[in-house]
Amino acid sequence: MINEEKVLSKPIFSVNDLSLWYGEEQALKKINLSIANNQVTAIIGPSGCGKSTFIKTLNRMVENIPIVKVDGDILYHQKSVFSNEMSVEELRTRVGMVFQKPNPFPKSIYENVVYGPKIHGIKDKYLLMEIAENSLKRAALWDEVKDRLKKNALSLSGGQQQRLCIARALAVSPDVLLMDEPTSALDPIATGRIEDLILDLKQEYTIVIVTHSMQQAARISDKTAFFLMGELIEYDDTQKIFSNPTNKKTEDYITGRFG
Amino acid sequence: MFTQRQPSIRKKASIGKLDLIEAAPKLNIEINRNRIARRLILNNSMRIVFLIATSLGIVILAILLYRIITDSIGWLNLDFLRGNLSIFPERAGIKGVIIGSVWLMLIVIPVTLVLGVSTAIYLEEYAAESRFQTLIKVNISNLASVPSVIFGLLGLAVFGRMLNLGSSILSGGLTLSLLVLPIIVVASQEAIKAVPGFLREASYAMGADKWMTVRKVVLPVALPGILTGSILAMSRAIGETAPLVVLGIPTLILRIPNSVMDDFTALPIQIYYWTLDTVLTREYANLAAATIVVLLAILFGMNAIAIIIRNKFETKF
């Protein structure tokens, strides 16, 4: 099952016996895994297997649903995300998130990017502009939008909107980026650009990405976790998962026998 | 026709796909042509029924407008808008009445906007789904349909007598505020509810707290809806008579109000009194008609503003 010899020396996230319920229904069953620094970790599995639920527990977004009950622990930099030492707001500043459907605010491109810095109290116009430029460059969007920063973000194409959402997440300088099927609403070309971007971002950020596409997981991730019915079936190097999976269920899934 | 052959389809469907295709029923073109012709006749007659229903309302409104406008001709002029109230019809003007209505709005707008929008934000964003919250929501919806005269009685008891504000502008304004508050709460709730959840999610995922999210994301997107609802509620307030009658607004005031503690008269109430006194002085009917035209012009103007705001500023996702 989980490769015990490869215990990471300094994981950014350690998930210990994590279980989660939506009311009576258990969505995650005793998940244990560690996520390494500056790597891309892909979460794969059929619909309803709990993969989205899982990454939403990493920044505690899942708790916005009132009936959710969580058991077990998640350590972020060796500190429990559920403890009082770190507020949810601080956690989410350091663990950014990009959603399935591009969700820019109906504001200008510039206002979208500086939203995070502004709510965290940065007022200096020059500093904000610098952050905006820097974030848009990192999200590989700067060249396309530098002449129309004041235009409404909803006027951008779907792929540009998604990169804008990435830029917006980067603007508060997180060290982890959670991505919940970020390309599922995009065409193949826009998807390719986001995938290239993820490979670039890996130098500076730790990325956890939920994906429906096994090819995508194989192309961009270092580690892959396979979820099924709320259980973590297998977690290993991506290469190993896709060439020589240990578990029969993993093999069935990646060879397309179900899911 | 379909009906006769359907049982056999069901039976064959269980055998296999190929059988189903072979058994596909054919429409009898001749029979069906007659049926289509009959349906088209019904279709056309329904259209006429609906047209009559619609025109009935419009015709009645047109007659009303025609009578009012013909009655007001010769009476509605600049002198009428600029003059003070008088017992002599030829000399009467409604400057003080318009000012009274404006004063009322100056109380109603800030009071209802602050209270109404705050209530809506609390109910939609802060209060968790609980029985208590559902109870409040249902009650607010019910309040919106309470007859206005009841609010007048409440205003008389609380503002007029208990707080000793009498029939002042403050007393009238607060009473009208109570009256339209539920409308604004419900309208604001709808506008806030219509803000897509993914925008809130985006904000929370950046480490924003609730108030930041409400202030920077939810309210700006909901604002056109809130304003539209508020303007419609204001036009309800500006046209209400019953609560003010209950408060005991004096029939004839010659002085123009200049503070919230002054007595006042307002457009709908002046229309009411002039109409009542038509039995004494026939020309009062013309004064009432002219005032109605002024009130209607204000109402249409407010509704137009509401429509413009809705069309121009609403974000589509």
Image: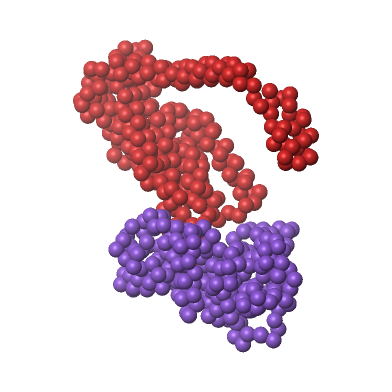
Chain colours: A purple, B red
Q: Nearer the viewer, residue B12 or B303?
A: B12
Residue A12 position by quadrant:
bottom right
Residue B136: x %, y % from top left: 59, 45
Please state, as top left, top right, bottom left or bottom right, where the C terminus of chain A lies in the image. Answer: bottom right
Which residue: 34% across, 63% down? A145
Please state, as top left, top right, bottom left or bottom right, where the N terminus of chain A lies in the image. Answer: bottom right
Residue B271: x %, y % from top left: 36, 23
Q: Nearer the viewer, residue A202 or B165?
A: A202
Which residue: 42% across, 64% down? A164
- Count the marks: 0
* Residue B263 visible to the viewer: no
Which residue: 79% across, 34% down? B11
Q: Is residue A202 above or below residue B234?
A: below
Q: Is residue B300 above or below residue B207?
A: above
* Residue B59 visible to the viewer: yes
Residue A77 position by quadrant:
bottom right
Image-based side of B166 in relation to B96, left or right: right
Residue A76: x %, y % from top left: 59, 78
